[in-house]
Image (cartoon, helix red, strand yellow):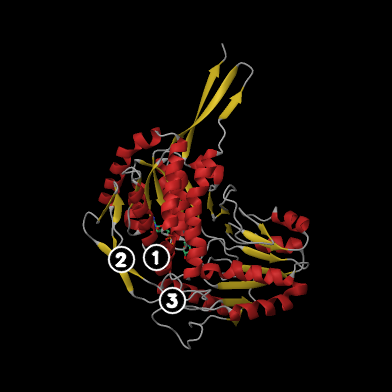
Amino acid sequence: MNALNFINGVFVDATDGQTLTNLNPATGQTIGTIARSKDSDVEEAVKAAASAQEAWSSLDMLERATWLDRLADGLEARKEELAHRESRDTGKPLALARRVDAQRSIDNFRFFADFARNQEPEVFEMRDATNFVHRNPVGTVGLITPWNLPLYLLSWKVAPALLMGNTVVAKPSELTPLTANLMCEVASEIGLPSGVLNVVHGYGPEVGQAILDHPSIRAISFTGGTATGRHVAASAAPMFKKLSLELGGKNATIILDDADLDVAVNGALRAGFTNGGQVCLCGSRILVHASIAEKFTSKLIQLVDEMICGSPEDESTQIGALISQEHMEKVESYIQLGIEEGGNVLTGGTREMTGQVGPSPEGAFLRPTVIDGLQHTSRTATEEIFGPVVTIHRFESDEEAIEIANSTEYGLAGSIWSNDTDRAHKIAQKIQTGIVWVNTWLHRDLRTPFGGVKNSGLGREGGAWSLGFFSEPLNVCIKHD
Ligand code: TXE
């Protein structure tokens, strides 16, 4: 299955015909080729977007909302295919791709369509005048997205961007092109006007950079690593492009002494190892009150050891392959670093599939890993690993838990487990982050703000925040006669 570009409503090769190879990380097998786009491809996409802009932005927002519904319906009709493509492209379990990636991609379009229908006019009355706030489109916007939740995160940007009357030039990760193209196939099937949605594939420093540099692309919404985010900001800022950055995280799962142990252990397991820890919101640092640390840790290890690490197609698999051999080696280097920094690997850290002994050289499989005994200031406990690895740290007081939680360069998310929600709420308000869940994790109301502080990013996505980013407010003040 090859991934061509989708420009002006048709699937085309890169102008110079160059391609990349797309691998299935669970088998090491080639899935197909990917268009290796450059500046000239972005130029074509921008031209297509420009030609579609006037007609698209002149539609009423509610008319554009019906296009989002049609996209959702089209994805829903192909949900199983969507899940299979996502699982093959990423190595994640098929069951997870169905339950999370496919469902949320559909939900993203439906949510923003419904959200549009619940918008009130923005009018501000004065004694002698009335102010009308109109939300005009930004124009052509650039969306650059990562490999961990490919269509989930791309649709999270495409939906509000289209709703607000923008045209789109999107670049998915070169590691996971397939479901972006399924979305384009649906766009073509439903007759979405040509040029409204364009997808160009290829390497970040090539086609991604071309999107950053193109003067007609007036906003960049980026999700990815902090290092790349820094580069994206440096490229976009001098051109005064609007910028939204959702970057890395090193989130704390805080277990208070009054937590329900079973609830907390299961919550910490889910937060730590969902998608093999390859979610920016994962709880990769577990802070546990010293008085329950022993009991908590032994329960956690027992559950971790029971996790089924295997082939993605197997419905019982809970941990599939990581995104690539290279990424697996990066994660392994952090486990090694953890040992060098004085950590004690309580379980995991080996390459094996459940039921099959020994490394599976063709697949990027790594068992879920728990490291204890590290300083919370160590590199292993402060740098984003983005794999199935958690570190455990003890604390004696709420204040110490807050201090440890805030001791990294990141500030994206976190969770607190306690039977006293008032106490947890007070602690949550002192955590330097964008989201804190109490007695749950990744429980999402799409109207709420999603995003981080410090090196976790810039701006928020979700509900009104997305509509705000993908529009330019115009205030018209009319004096009463
Ligand atoms: O991210 P990149 P990658 C973290 C995680 C991971 C690290 C790198 O720690 O190990 O980031 O992952 C495009 N100009 N997260 O390699 O490089 C690139 O092609 C323009 C957290 O996926 O940031 C891809 O489409 N674009 C993150 C997108 O940027 C460029 C999820 C993201 O790639 C570019 C994934 C350039 N110069 C990784 N270089 C999260 N917050 O969820 C790359 N790109």
Q: Residue at x 51, y 41 (%)?
A: 467
- Extreme-top residue of the structure: 481
Task: Decide if residue 176 is in sight here.
Answer: yes
Spatial CA distance of label 1 from label 2 is: 10 Å
- Extreme-left residue of the structure: 16
Q: Quadrant of the N terminus?
A: bottom left
User: Residue flagged by tag 1: what amino acid is it?
Assistant: Arg
Residue neighbourhood size for the residue with mark 2, other residues' Cα within 10 Å, grouped as few (<14), some (14–19), many (≥20): few
Closer-to-camera residue (75/259): 75
Query: According to the image, label 2 marks what residue?
Result: 1
Quadrant for ligand 1 reads: bottom left
Query: As drawn, is 177 to the left or to the right of 475?
Result: left
Q: Are marks 1 and 3 in contact (CB under 8 Å)?
A: no
User: Residue flagged by tag 3: what amino acid is it?
Assistant: Ala
Q: Earlier in the sequence, mark 1 or mark 3?
A: 1
Q: Secondary structure at mark 3?
A: loop
Q: Between tags 3 and 2, which lies in front?
A: 2
Q: Are marks 1 and 2 in contact (CB under 8 Å)?
A: yes
Spatial CA distance of label 1 from label 3 is: 18 Å
Q: Residue at x 33, y 50 (%)?
A: 188
Query: According to the image, label 3 marks what residue?
Result: 364
Image vertical order of residue 309 relative to residue 132, above or below: below
Point out residue 346 in the picture as x, y percentages from the top left corner: 62, 81
Q: Between tags 1 and 3, which lies in front?
A: 1
